[in-house]
Image: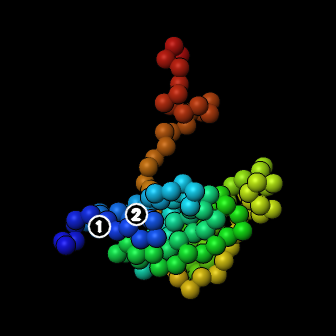
């Protein structure tokens, strides 16, 4: 398989698709009852980590698409995760459902931090520039034409 061909693997009912020429990846679950991929991040070793909405866990995937690890959480609606802390050695995991704790668990809507043996890397910051703001506080792209 050449390095720029898509890789498709079916592992633990997760389909991983990765185009290594662009260094991108996507994860899909084939059953909504097991959770759907939501927020994701990449660690320093190039492994994809994904939150599973309604899945009560996060998963770590190797660059070849194999599931390396699953980490359970005490609430179902896992929305995203990132690395932070000293040397990016902590996972910060966001959840939803704070207004439905009776359905989603007492810790629904909480922010979790967990130490991990994996290390993250700094997030990419885009260079997108917002429109300049006029002295009246309205961005140039929103100014009325009749002025």
Asked if one can make out residue 38 in the rendered structure from this viewpoint, the answer is no
Q: Nearer the viewer, residue 74 or 91?
A: 74
How many badges with numbers are in the image?
2
Task: State how far apart marks 1 and 2 are (Cα).
Answer: 10 Å
Position of residue 101 relative to residue 6, above or below, is above
| Left or right for 73, reference 118 | right
| Left or right for 4, reference 98 | left
**Residue 76's spot in the image, x, y percent?**
67, 61
**Which dot marks residue 7?**
1
- Do the CB atoms of the residues marked 1 and 2 lie less than 8 Å apart? no
Q: Nearer the viewer, residue 4 or 57?
A: 57
> What residue is shown with label 2?
15
Residue at 34%, 68% in the rendered image = 9
* Residue sitting farthest toward the top: 146
The label nearer to you, 1 versus 2, is: 2
Asked if one can make out residue 89 in the rendered structure from this viewpoint, the answer is yes
Position of residue 37 relative to residue 146, above or below, is below
Residue at 66%, 77% in the rendered image = 114
SS for callout 2? strand
Position of residue 67 relative to residue 37, above or below, is below
* Residue sitting farthest toward the bottom: 117
| Left or right for 80, reference 61 | right
Disc with the residue nearer the chain's start (1 vs 2): 1
Q: Residues within 10 Å of mark 2 (few under 14, many from 20)?
A: some
**Residue 129's spot in the image, x, y percent?**
45, 47
**Residue 108's spot in the image, x, y percent?**
74, 59
Asked which quadrant contains residue 92, the reply is: bottom right
* Residue sitting farthest toward the left: 2
Residue at 81%, 54% in the rendered image = 102
Residue at 64%, 81% in the rendered image = 115
């Amino acid at each position: 398989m050449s390095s720029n061909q898509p890789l498709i693997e079916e592992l633990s009912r997760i389909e991983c698709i990765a185009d290594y020429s662009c260094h991108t990846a996507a994860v899909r679950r084939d059953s909504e009852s097991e959770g759907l991929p939501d927020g994701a991040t990449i660690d320093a070793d190039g492994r994809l980590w994904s939150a599973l909405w309604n899945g009560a866990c996060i998963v770590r995937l190797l660059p070849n698409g194999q599931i390396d690890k699953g980490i359970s959480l005490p609430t179902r609606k896992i929305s995203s995760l990132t690395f932070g802390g000293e040397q990016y050695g902590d996972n910060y995991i966001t959840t939803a459902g704070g207004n439905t704790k009776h359905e989603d668990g007492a810790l629904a809507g909480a922010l979790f931090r967990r130490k991990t043996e994996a290390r993250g890397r700094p997030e990419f910051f885009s260079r997108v520039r917002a429109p300049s703001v006029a002295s009246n506080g309205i961005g140039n792209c929103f100014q009325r034409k009749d002025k």
